[in-house]
Image: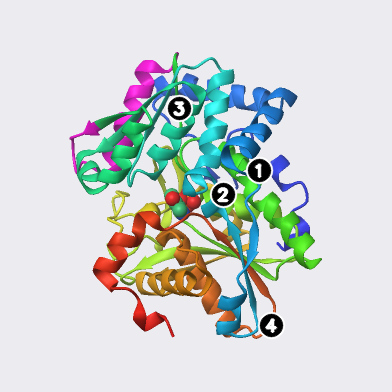
Amino acid sequence: MDYRDFDNYTKHFPTSDGRFGSYGGAYLPPQLVTAFREIDDAYETICNSAQFISELRRIRREFQGRPTPVYHAERLSRKLGKCQIYLKREDLNHTGAHKLNHCMGEGLLAKYMGKKKLIAETGAGQHGVALATAAAYFGMECDIYMGEVDIAKQAPNVTRMKVLGARVIPVSRGLKTLKEAVDAAFEAYLNEYETAIYCIGSAVGPHPFPKMVRDFQMVVGEEAREQFRQMTGNHPDAICACVGGGSNSIGMFVPFLGDPVDIYGVEPLGRGSKIGDHAASMTFGKKGVLHGFESMLLQDDKGEPLPVYSIASGLDYPSVGPEHAYLRDCGRISYVTATDEEAVEAFFMLSRLEGIIPALESSHALAYAIRFARENSTGSILVNLSGRGDKDVDYVIEHYGYGDKYAD
Ligand SMILES: *Cc1c(COP(=O)(O)O)cnc(C)c1O
């Protein structure tokens, strides 16, 4: 399929049972089916109401600081050749990344549903911070489940969540990381679903979450498409974004599906292609079910998720949003990879040449744009710069120094 086949795409995908082709769905314990159906029904009615739409619009403008700009990275482009690199500046969104886009949407939905509490798990803590921000804004309670190992590793984000008034609940079973935290958050939701709502951190999980998160993140691509057109009178030749669970990328990509634009999702190749050294689920995964949805999954012979790694903790998830798997099968989006080393090079190049310190996650998207600009002597590429890198500077200088080898 090419771009001409994508008119009205969002009206048909996902289907009412949450399918993108054969991916997606809702694999839930029977006790949770009703709770998820309630969210789905509420989402379909409330989110189309004029009142919801206008309130969300006001929140985006006045609280989040949207629209975020599109920026022409002229010095970086000139350094690489003649291809022009543009950035969609989600690093300038309130809290410094795109995650707030869906957290504010989920919080507003919770308010209209009369819920009093937001529940979620967090791994690296970025989702927990964004959700704690939304809970504070709406005056709701917020319970964040987090593995004890992650709590020890991510102290600054734990502090931020607590300052924002959230409860951070340590999970001490199993490996004490994200997987156990997801289980604990689901169990808590099961007990409290009449007064609380579960809020997922990416375009993953059982239906309706991949759809909801996509819809809330589409503001990124919609703005960027219009801004790029105003700046240049045209559309970019290519766009790219990093893919962890797939929320910033799907939000950027979907508004461009119907344009003659090449689309690249960039997965983390970490230290290389060996098991445990990367988190490139589209590139190396097989179809499977994890956390209540079907998609590409890095799994062993028994279907158990494999260990994953990336320098960017926001990208180390063994699966990916189901819509990505579908759009790849359609031939509309290409999935490529960038290593830790390439991401660090991009991190320093953008810092030194443009005065923008990108998140290590976003640095993967930028690394691909740099490769694209080196290989293409004309044209343009628009990168979704999903977040800012203040959270990453200590780690980077400890392991890579101040990047002088990338500076000239
Ligand atoms: C969490 C995060 C990501 C990865 O999540 P997606 O759902 O794939 O977008 C990317 N960039 C930043 C800055 C993040 O915090």
Which residue shows up at 57% across the image and 25% down it? 109
- Which of labels 4 and 3 is toward the front? 3
The one nearer the camera, 314 or 129, is 129
Per the image, the residue denoted by label 3 is 136
Residue 311 in sight in this render:
no
Res. 13 mark: 1
Picture coordinates of residue 48, whole percent (x, y): 71, 28
- Which of labels 3 and 2 is toward the front? 3
Which residue shows up at 46% across the image and 56% down it? 388
Per the image, the residue denoted by label 2 is 323
Q: Quadrant of the N terminus?
A: bottom right
Which amino acid is tagged 4? Thr
Image side of residue 287 versus residue 151, left or right: right
Look at the image and give the residue range highlighted in magenta. 170-194
Picture coordinates of residue 378, whole percent (x, y): 69, 82
- Assign a secondary structure to mark 3: helix
Q: Is residue 303 above or below residue 14?
A: below
Check whether the beta carbons of the residues at disc 2 and disc 1 lie within 8 A of each other: yes
Count of all numbered marks drawn on residues in the image: 4
